[in-house]
Image: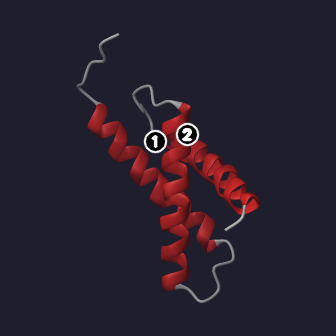
Amino acid sequence: MDAGSILLYIVIGAVIGIVARLIVPNTGGMGWVMTLVLGIVGALIGGWLAGAVFEDTAGVDWIASILVAVILVWIWAASRRGTTRVT
C-alpha cells in the first residue's frame, strides 16, 4: 500500500463519514476526527462486505460503506447520549 492509496482511503472515508453524519441526527458534538475515523472504518468494512456478497461491486460498495458508517455513527452517538463532558 503506497501513500496515494492511503490518501485515497482518507478522502473516501471523509466523504462517507460526512454523508453518514448528515444522515444520523443528534450526533452529540461529534468532531471531525471521529467523523473521519468512522468514515474510514465504514468504508473498509462496507467495501469488504460488498465484495464478499457481490461479484461486481460497482456502486454497491459505496452504498454498503455508507450504511456501515451510518450504523457506526449511530452507535457512537447513542453511546454519548446522557454523558456530560468536563471542560
In-image side of 38 versus 2 (left or right): left
**Residue 31 placed where, x, y %?**
50, 30
Quadrant of res 3: bottom right
Camera-nearest residue between 87 and 47 = 87
- Residue found at the very far front of the displayed protein: 2
Residue drawn 48% across and 75% down?
A: 49
Three-letter code, disc 1: Val
Q: Secondary structure at mark 1?
A: loop
Label 2 close to label 1 by CB (< 8 Å): yes
Location of residue 74 in the rendering, given as x and y in whole percent from the top left corner: 38, 45
Query: Residue extending furthest top?
Result: 87
Instruction: Using the image, determine if residue 60 lies above or below residue 7.
Output: below
In percent of the image, x 69 and y 77: which residue is there?
A: 58
Image x and y of residue 60, in percent: 61, 73
Q: Residue at x 48, y 48 (%)?
A: 38
Q: Find residue 24 and name its label.
A: 1
Which residue is situated farthest in the left direction here?
Answer: 82
Position of the C terminus by quadrant: top left
Mark number for residue 56? Answer: none
Q: Quadrant of the N terminus?
A: bottom right
Q: Residue furthest bottom?
A: 55
- Mark 2 surroundings: few (<14), some (14-19) or many (≥20) residues within 10 A: few
- Judge the density around disc 1: few (<14), some (14-19), many (≥20) Cα neighbours within 10 Å: some
Query: Which amino acid, by three-letter code, is at mark 2?
Result: Leu
Q: Residue at x 67, y 71 (%)?
A: 59
Q: Coloured how? A: secondary structure
Q: Is residue 63 above or below residue 80?
A: below
Q: State the residue position of label 2.
A: 22
The quarter holding residue 84 reads: top left
Q: CA distance from mark 2 to mark 1?
A: 6 Å
